[in-house]
Amino acid sequence: MEPADSIGRLGFARWYERRLIEGHAWFVSGFLCLIAIAACMEELNLRGSLPRLLGYAVLVIAALAIGIYAIRRYGQILSEAESLGERATCRSCGAYARFRLVPPAQAHCRRCGNEWTLFETG
């Protein structure tokens, strides 16, 4: 359970912030791949040499594969952060991100002592 290790080490607020930064870095990477594809397609013409044509084609395919992967990672990271962010509020006292993890998947509120399940196991 990777998020549990990171949350236990960093605390929820710092973990959440880092996940959002990582997710948006993947989004920017995907957007840059889109720009690279557009630039290569604009330069692509059939009057050039065969090696140049193949070079642009390989670059477009690589940028497309990386861009698709980047946008999928962006979605996965943001959905994970959103899912855990929704469960980071204590239902008893309403404190947000003020808990410590109790193995394996429980959160223990630092303010009121309430415990709830943070991670879905199984």
Image: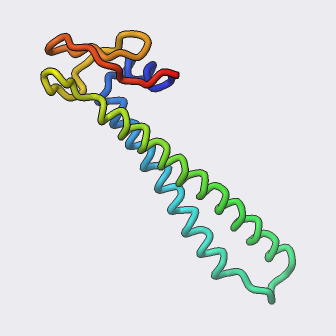
Q: Is residue 8 toward the left or the right of residue 95 in the image?
A: right
Residue 91 appears in which quarter of the rendering?
Answer: top left
* Residue at x 41% of width, y 10% of height: 103
- Above or below, comparing residue 68 to residue 113 in the picture: below
Percent x, y of residue 101:
34, 14
**Residue 46 to residue 22: above or below:** below
Picture residue at 30% right of the left edge, 35% below the top: 86
Q: Which residue is pictured at 28% across the width and 28% down the height?
A: 88
Residue 111: image location, x then y, percent: 15, 15
Q: What percent of the width, then of the height, locates residue 30?
A: 53, 58
Residue 33: percent from left, percent from top: 58, 62
Foreground pick, 58 / 108: 108
- Quarter of the image for residue 116 reads top left
Q: Quadrant of residue 35?
A: bottom right
Outermost residue toward the front? 122
Q: Residue at x 35, y 15 (%)?
A: 106
Nearest the camera: 43 or 7?
A: 7
Front-most of residues 59 and 12: 12
Taking the view exactly as shown, the residue that stands out farthest to the right is 50
Q: 119 above or below 100?
A: below
